[in-house]
Image (cartoon, helix red, strand yellow):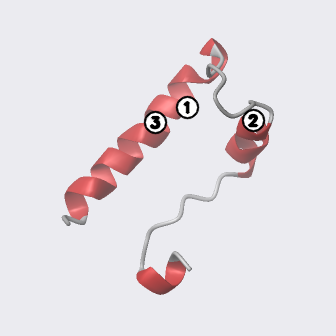
């Protein structure tokens, strides 16, 4: 569905495996702060490239 709408998809098997271990609504472990910050930076960058 996202590809049909030309929505960028970030594929990162390692990140998915790490995030799957965290229960929804729980705090992100400090060991993942850097990778989550990088992911958020990518999303913010995309938001600037694709205005509403």
Q: CA distance from mark 1 to mark 2?
A: 10 Å
Disc number at residue 38?
Answer: 3
Which residue is labeled 2 in the image? 18
What quarter of the picture does the C terminus occupy? Answer: bottom left
Q: Secondary structure at mark 1?
A: helix
Residue shown at the point (66%, 17%) measured from the top left:
29
Residue 42: percent from left, percent from top: 39, 47
Disc 3 residue crowd, few under 14, some 14–19, many 20+, Cα 10 Å:
few
Q: CA distance from mark 3 to mark 2?
A: 15 Å
Q: Is residue 49 left or right of residue 4?
A: left
Residue 26: quarter of image:
top right
Q: Nearer the viewer, mark 1 or mark 2?
A: 2
Residue shown at the point (45%, 30%) measured from the top left:
37
- Is label 1 in contact with label 2 (beta carbons under 8 Å)? yes
Image vertical order of residue 27 relative to residue 15, above or below: above
Residue 32: percent from left, percent from top: 62, 24
Which residue is labeled 1 in the image? 35
Q: How many marks?
A: 3
Disc number at residue 17?
Answer: none
Sequence-wise, the earlier of marks 3 and 2 is 2
Q: CA distance from mark 1 to mark 3?
A: 5 Å
């Amino acid at each position: 569905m996202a590809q049909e709408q030309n929505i960028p998809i970030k594929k990162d098997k390692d990140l998915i495996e790490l995030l799957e271990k965290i229960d929804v609504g729980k705090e992100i472990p400090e060991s993942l702060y850097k990778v989550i910050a990088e992911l958020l930076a990518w999303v913010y960058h995309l938001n600037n490239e694709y205005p509403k």
